């Protein structure tokens, strides 16, 4: 009988270890599922859409490397030549039908398809720095920005309490206040925000951040656009612009130096760091999410080819985990139509 | 002389213990990674190549088993117990074969690159279809729990036979050589 009990205890211990590893015994620990639940709390549940950056438009084109990046990274994408690209422009927030607004964070996700089947995916935004430097900060901000059930607006006291605990967000906020927003998607600069590492053929690595800098001329967002009254005016302007001529961005890689923080996306690197133009992104066609392959691509920033590696930034693994959770949830949901329909693109 | 027939062959025992360690590690990594924020990427990067390694090993093990002579069941086991033991062995083999394939298939359907290490990656085995991905993703979880339960049953049964019936069941698969009594 004692032995039988002993066997039971052994089996319970094994099962318990697994439940512990699965986070069942620590329900308050931050998990991808809790992150996703919180996004749904704040942005509502929208069947078939991303939990964040829900409103978007698919694009496609190619990246032409000028070979300048090859000394920095052994990734095939930086050898002289052209690789096909699928991308997605988006606005931050969980509501796929929100009205376009100049202050809403703009996103650009890209998938570079390398010749031998490797891929490079990146999800960038038009902010120069990120307002958070760890997953908990991002999560706490999400909780603080949750609309009050009565006023339908975030509680200013909760936001004030959040900011009191997160000096990095206050600090980044000062930089974000000063940055000049452009008039549209086509003349926005999109930044990697997180640091990564480029690994060269000898195995040596350097910290980098990258930006897609538009060839299209900068125009300030404050200049009133003709169609600003329309709730999709940013996307419509992008469609009009891309149908007139292919849009181009230079991929500018900024090389970090010893002492530059790679684990804190809320702090900009000092001015004067070497910047290398490694090639040109050309986007020549737009497509509604109804038909674009971009809808079903998870622009996970840690899908990297050999030659680009993650840095020690804790946001990277968190982004990968939560994007994956969001992808898995929407994959099985019925796909509701996107705000930008196929007929909008044909216009 | 008798020991050869009381124990599984050395290659079978080696494969058993190697896979036991790998499969337990995989179950732990799998359940931990889906709940992890900070270690997610590290664990997924380990999960993919280990899964493919298990797929390769289970095929080798299955072939090896076909060409090996098995020791007889202990006389203490009834015919029903023998039936249950054989069925659970078949279930384990099936799960160990199917689970990595479902993982490979689901990544294919999601159009994730199936990276092993460095630039080494596997081709997709299914078309890009997120509904199919969602289905296989759920299947992967269900099979993982089923695999874990089957492992617990197998482990429990061996403990029961070894500690209570005391029929030397464990020594049949012991990693070391056990001489016949």
Image: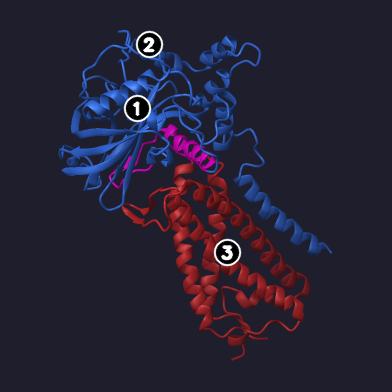
B25 is within the stretch colored magenta: no
Q: Is residue B114 above or below residue A266?
A: below
Q: Which mark is residue B42?
A: none
Q: Chain of mark 3?
A: B
Q: Which mark is residue B95?
A: 3
Q: To which residue does mark 1 refer?
A: A261
- Locate residue A333: give its quadrant: top right
**Chain A pictured colour:** blue
Image spot of residue A86 (x, y percent): 32, 39
Cα–Cα gap, marks 3 and 2: 55 Å
**Could you tell me which quadrant the C terminus of chain B lies in?**
bottom right
Q: Is A136 on the left or on the right of A346, as rendered? A: right
Dot 3 crowding, Cα within 10 Å, few <14, some 14–19, many 20+: some
Region in magenta? A303-331
Viewer-nearest residue: B7 or B91: B91
Viewer-nearest residue: B67 or A21: B67
Q: Residue at 43%, 36% (x, y): give it.
A: A290
Q: Residue at 56%, 54% (x, y): give it.
A: B140
- Locate residue B94: give its quadrant: bottom right
């Amino acid at each position: 009988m004692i032995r039988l009990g002993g066997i039971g205890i052994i089996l319970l211990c094994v099962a318990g270890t697994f439940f512990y590893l699965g986070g069942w015994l620590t329900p308050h620990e931050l998990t991808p599922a809790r992150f996703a639940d919180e996004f749904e709390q704040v942005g509502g549940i929208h069947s078939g859409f991303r939990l964040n950056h829900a409103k978007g438009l698919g694009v496609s084109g190619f990246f032409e490397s000028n070979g300048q990046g090859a000394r920095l990274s052994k990734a095939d994408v930086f050898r002289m030549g052209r690789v096909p690209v699928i991308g997605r422009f988006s606005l931050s927030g969980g509501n796929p039908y929100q009205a376009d607004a100049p202050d809403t964070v703009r996103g650009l996700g890209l998938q570079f398809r390398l010749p031998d089947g490797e891929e490079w995916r990146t999800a960038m935004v038009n902010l120069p720095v990120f307002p958070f430097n760890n997953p908990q900060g991002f999560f706490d901000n999400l909780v603080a920005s949750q609309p009050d059930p009565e006023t339908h607006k975030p509680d200013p006291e909760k936001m004030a309490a959040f900011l009191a605990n997160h000096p990095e967000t206050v600090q980044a906020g000062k930089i974000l206040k000063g940055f000049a927003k452009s008039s549209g998607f086509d003349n926005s600069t999109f930044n990697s925000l997180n640091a990564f590492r480029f690994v060269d053929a000898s195995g040596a690595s350097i910290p980098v951040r990258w930006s897609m800098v538009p060839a299209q001329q900068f125009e300030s967002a404050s200049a009133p656009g003709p169609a600003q009254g329309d709730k999709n005016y940013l996307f419509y302007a992008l469609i009009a612009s891309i149908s007139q001529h292919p849009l181009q961005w230079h991929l500018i890689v900024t090389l970090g130096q010893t002492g530059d923080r790679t684990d804190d996306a809320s702090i900009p690197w000092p001015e004067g760091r070497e910047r290398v133009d490694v090639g040109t992104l050309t986007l020549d066609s737009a497509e509604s999410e109804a038909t674009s392959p971009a809808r079903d691509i998870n622009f996970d920033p840690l899908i990297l080819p050999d030659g680009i590696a993650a840095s020690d930034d804790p946001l990277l693994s968190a982004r990968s985990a939560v994007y994956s959770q969001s992808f898995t949830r929407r994959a099985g949901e019925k796909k509701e139509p996107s705000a930008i329909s196929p007929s909008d693109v044909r216009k | 002389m008798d020991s050869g027939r009381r124990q599984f062959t050395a290659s079978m025992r080696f494969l058993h213990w190697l896979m036991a360690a790998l499969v337990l590690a995989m179950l732990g990594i799998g359940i931990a990674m889906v709940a992890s924020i900070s270690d997610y990427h590290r664990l997924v990067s380990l999960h993919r190549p280990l899964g493919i390694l298990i797929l390769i090993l289970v095929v080798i093990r299955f072939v090896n088993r076909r060409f090996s002579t098995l020791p007889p069941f202990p006389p203490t086991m009834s015919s029903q117990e023998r039936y249950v033991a054989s069925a659970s062995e078949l279930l384990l083999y099936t799960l160990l074969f199917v689970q990595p394939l479902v993982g490979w298939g689901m990544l294919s359907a999601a159009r994730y690159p199936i990276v092993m290490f460095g630039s080494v990656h596997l081709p997709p085995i299914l078309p890009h279809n997120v509904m199919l991905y969602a289905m296989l993703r759920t299947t992967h979880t269900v099979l993982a729990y089923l695999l874990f339960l089957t492992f617990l049953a197998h482990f429990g049964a061996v403990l029961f036979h070894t500690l209570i019936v005391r029929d030397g069941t464990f020594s049949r698969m012991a990693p070391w050589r056990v001489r016949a009594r």
